[in-house]
Image (spheres, grey):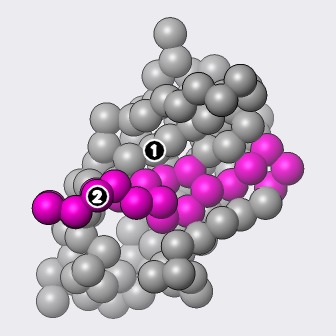
Amino acid sequence: QVQLVESGGGLVQAGGSLRLSCAASVRIFSTMGWYRQAPGKQRELVAAVSIIGRTNYADSVKGRFNISRDYAKSTVYLQMNSLKPEDTAVYYCNARSTTGSDFWGQGTQVAVSS
């Protein structure tokens, strides 16, 4: 059974930084990434990294967030800098298998105060 274990959320002041981590229980994923969902809004892609290291970011986080991946540990990280109140959301780790199946973490809360 595939498990994604997230850590690193919390409360931070605007302009601060947080680092999210997500460790997968199995190694073979084509893409790993982070989504977020704010109250009353749809879940949206924040950043993703493919198996060959290609990255994709939401326009709202470009230049502030950095996604990285440790393939040996099957772990993906999201370094979030210059955080804004509008970044407040529950952040979900996503992993997509080579056959196209999606797996999700339990979510970690990020709250940014102004």
> Residue 42: which disc?
2
- Which residue appears at 31% of the width and 43% of the height? 107
Residue 2: % across, % down: 52, 18
Please tell me which residue lies in front, 71 or 50: 50
Tell me, yes or no, if residue 12 can be seen here: no
Chain part drawn in magenta: 33-53
Residue 98: % across, % down: 74, 28
User: Which image quarter: residue 100?
Assistant: top right
The residue pinned by badge 1 equals 93
Type of amino acid under label 2:
Gln
- Which residue appears at 50% of the width and 41% of the height? 94
Q: Identify whether 19 is placed above or below 23.
A: below
User: What element does badge 1 sit on?
Assistant: strand
Q: How crowded is mark 1: few (under 14 residues within 10 Å), some or many (20 or more)?
A: many
Mark 1 touching mark 2, by CB under 8 A?
A: no
Residue 58: % across, % down: 52, 73
Please tell me which residue lies in front, 82 or 35: 35
Count all numbered tags in the image, as a single digit. Answer: 2
Tell me, yes or no, if residue 4 can be seen here: yes
Q: Earlier in the sequence, mark 1 or mark 2?
A: 2
Is 29 left, or right, of 102 in this rendering?
right
Gap in angstroms between the C-alphas marked 1 and 2: 15 Å
